[in-house]
Amino acid sequence: MSFQELHSVQYSQLRRDLLRDKGSDLQKEFLEALRQDGQEFLEWMRNKVGITVGNSPELSSVEPISEDEFKEPTKVTEAAVFSALQSLEPRIACRPPFWGRVALWCIETKKIGKPSYLAANGGTGPGGSARIDEALKSDDHKKLDSAVRTVLRRLSGLPEARGNRSVYVDCPLARAWWRCFWARECASGDEATEKKIINVFRTQQNYWEELVNLVISRNSVLGDAKVRKALIQTLAREKAGADPDEKLFQQSFLKNINMQIGIRAAIQELGVFSIDELRALLEEKLIPLA
Amino acid sequence: MTVRALPYPILEDDALSYPDGQYNVEIRKLSDDNAFSITHTVIGASFINKALDEGRARCGCLVAIPMTGYRKLHLADAGRRELEISWEDSVVGQPPSLRPLILTTEKIECELTATDGVDEAWHQTVAFPKGARLAVKHYYRQVASLAGMLRIRVDPERKAGTFRVGTSQEEGFFFDVRVAADMFAFIRKDSNHSYIEHRGSVYTHIISKCFEILRADFSKPDDDGNPEWENYPNLKALSEQLEQQELPHWANEEEFSAEEVATAMHPHKFPMIAEDED
């Protein structure tokens, strides 16, 4: 099944044009469109970026989400996003034009109530509307630019500024899909393990970001599905009942275990081992050193 | 010269462990873009050939594309020097990197001597763990030329004689070149056509614009300080090509000039004009 996407070249051009000059007229126009109702913003986007032929990526089973939920979707919402897009191929799931189309569909159908949700930062910061209003009123170039960048990150990921990891980390809908996809891949059909793995991925944002960084960085050993499975299955088993401060669930642990795996991988090609052998290696030799 | 602090000898280009050793691979595309055959040959390293013949080591190839978190080791059957590999496009997306290698499939401990082909420094008992790389090549990337990055398409709404260049990063990076119908028909003419120099100049103009775009949009670092172009294997390959041809990189603010690099890579050519013509 081929899904619709935003026109790749036009969308790339729009992102670059928006990032080119802080406080530009284009940035203000973009934010002003976001501040209006969904139809105005959708029309603004349609005038700039076409949509490719294909099936509409419909998230019919996803309930409308509030601004707070959009910033950090619940497990239920994430599962619904994945369920609606189960047939999605990974090579499409790492593409900003695809997720941009999904976000626009959500705005069209009011799954995302207002386009200004895209400008809301994490935590207890101001809501999207308040942030846009302040940026436009102050005409502060840095604030305008920062708001635009947040919107682009939430809309589809922003690889120009944040590298390839941005789709997996910054776009809540894409992040939901990838968490569920890797959880399913690593659980090898065991539903209980899949749920535990989701809990590992949701430990904290910076933990997920570090994991993504390690998996998709250049030629990382964690890019190997078997090594990834072995590590994540081990973490999932430890997660249940673990103290929140447990070292295995700190960002620093991921850096350290990646280093230990890297040291070992310099001497042995880990892809030659079975998953059980890799788990034994991790549990007995590498995790204690991390 | 490569120096590795490993507890066992490894055969690779420029390494010292096997003084007369050579590890050669032949990579052939099979029926489609996602399938290759790799033939491994080892000369002057009898230890490695013996390990392969005994089934204690196997020929293999790593297939990697970081963007989708894909990295997989493919192994040939025991005793074989040929390996066929393929991957699903749905998972990989853009052309992957390939790294041929030979590795042990079990622990091996033995006394190495001169007959094994190793340097004198390795004439001792050596332990090879399971997965030890006995021989490695560098990473091979599929797309390396600027021509391979151009997707030239006709845009029927364009005014005659015009074109426009954009970029897309979604399939490993390419330049999207939209040309008017007359221009499209002209540049597709058979290369024996009498306007071959003119067609070449049109192409030079296009690649000059491509380099302008790289200069304007792909030379600054991202938020982490990493140059954005390094995310794309084919831009890395282009970068290496510039280095080989001793041409300045598009991120080099002082020395780079789009038209200079474009014309150096694809010079304008001119028809011979007879002396008595005006």
Image (cartoon, coloured by chain):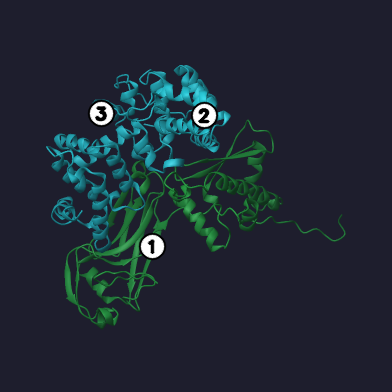
Chain colours: A cyan, B green
Task: Find numbered disc 1 in the image and state the secondary structure of the residue it sits on.
Answer: loop
Mark 2, chain letter? A
Which residue occupies 64% across, 50% down? B204
Mark 1 is surrounded, within 10 Å at the Cα level, by few (under 14), some (14 to 19) or many (20 or more) other residues, namely few
What SS does tag 3 mark? helix
Give the percent coordinates (x, y) of residue B205: 65, 48
Residues at marks 1 and 2, CA–CA distance in whole angstroms: 40 Å
* Residue A188 percent coordinates (x, y): 19, 41
Instruction: Please report contact status of discs 2 and 3: CB closer than 8 Å, yes or no.
Output: no
Q: Is residue B168 above or below residue B247?
A: above
Tell me, for residue A79, which label it has, or none. Answer: 3
Which corner quadrant of the image does residue A129 belong to?
top left
User: Looking at the picture, which amino acid does disc 3 mark?
Assistant: Ala
On the image, which quarter does residue A289 sit in? bottom left
Q: Which residue is mark 1?
A: B138
Q: Is residue B232 visible?
A: yes
Which secondary structure lies at badge 2?
Answer: loop
Q: Nearer the viewer, residue B170 or A28?
A: A28
Return the chain for callout 3. Answer: A
**Sequence-earlier tag: 2 or 3:** 2
Total marks drawn?
3
